[in-house]
Image: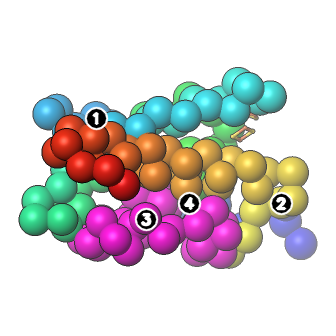
Amino acid sequence: MALYSEKVMDHFRNPRNAGVIENADGIGEVGNARCGDIMKIYLKIENDIITDAKFETFGCGSAIASSSMATELIKGKPVSEALTLTNQAVAQALDGLPAHKLHCSVLAEEAIKKALQDYYEKKGMKL
Ligand code: FES
Ligand code: FES
């Protein structure tokens, strides 16, 4: 079996939602000190629905594929649902990641949570 699923390769080669959202309603940046990868997630939120999500990821292929899949998974979803997105769900949607690459999907979960936290803080609310 190949180390990476076709879905991982597809999202690595053709990342969905790469880029920046100007005047984003929530921004979350996280990094992994061990590998040095950095992931930044931008969210546009209207009436508590995530209408757009974009990412900038400086990192490995799995981190790029995880960002791409994670932004796809939360687009069009209510904030409450995006808050429950786990790294396992991201990895599963990619048809799995090698064990030593699971931390790449953790970055995606953390970056989204941080962006949502930022959204709430900007609104003067607590998560
Ligand atoms: Fe970890 Fe990306 S720096 S492989
Ligand atoms: Fe660190 Fe992929 S190797 S996020």
Is residue 107 highlighted in magenta?
no
Q: What residue type is labelled 4?
A: Asp
**SS of the residue at dot 4?**
helix
Magenta stretch, main secondary structure class = helix
Magenta-tinted stretch: 67-94
Front one among 64 and 107: 107
From the image, state whether disc 3 or disc 1 is nearer to you: 3
From the image, state whether disc 4 or disc 3 is nearer to you: 3
Residue of label 3: 83
Q: Do the residues labelled 4 and 1 touch (CB within 8 Å)?
A: no
Q: For residue 20, which numbered disc appears in the image?
A: 1
Q: What residue type is labelled 1?
A: Val
Q: Is residue 112 above or below residue 25?
A: below
Residue of label 2: 98
Front one among 47 and 32: 47
Q: Going by the image, does 81 lie left or right of 35?
A: left
Q: Give coordinates of residue 66: x percent, y percent.
A: 57, 54
Residue of label 4: 10
Q: Going by the image, does 22 lie left or right of 115?
A: left
> Considering only order in the chain, which callout, 4 or 2, is on the residue closer to the N terminus?
4
Q: Which colour scheme is used?
A: rainbow
